[in-house]
Amino acid sequence: MLNYTPFSCSQNIQGTYPIMVQIFICNADGELLNKSNETKNIRWMPLIELKGLLESNKGLFYPMHITTLERYLKMKLKY
């Protein structure tokens, strides 16, 4: 039996192929990868800085992640 509750789910039903993203909140250990074919400008940042980036330029983010990031910030920052 498998049972889990993601923090957020997003699904793209348009375009070349459908995709579903399931997001979980977790604690992470270890070092950040310096480079990957799935990352661009990866780094840690304060939540208030993330909020500012989302408000000023959503084009910096993968479109399917924007709603989840806004939901997380709303929960953590109470905005």
Image (cartoon, rainbow, N blue to C red):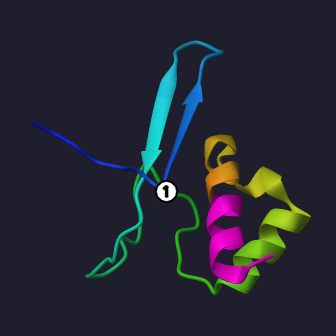
Viewer-closest of 62 and 21: 21
Q: Position of residue 39 (x, y in %)?
A: 49, 56
Quarter of the rendering containing residue 73: bottom right
Amino acid at circle 1: Thr
Q: Is residue 2 magenta?
A: no
The relative height of residue 58 versus residue 44 in the rendered view (above or below) is above
Instruction: Say which quarter of the image contains residue 71.
Output: bottom right
Q: Quadrant of the N terminus?
A: top left
Q: Secondary structure at mark 1?
A: loop
Q: Which residue is at a point 47% across and 55% down the rendered structure image? A: 7
Q: Can you give x and y, in whole percent of width and height, for residue 20 in the image?
A: 47, 31
| For residue 53, above or below residue 10 | below
Determine if the magenta segment contains residue 77.
yes
- Closest to the observer, 34 or 64: 64
Residue 72 vertical placement versus 18 (above, below)? below
- Residue at point 64%, 15% (across, down): 15
User: Which residue matches tag 1?
Assistant: 39
Residue appearing at x 63%, y 41% in the figure? 64
Range of magenta residues: 69-79
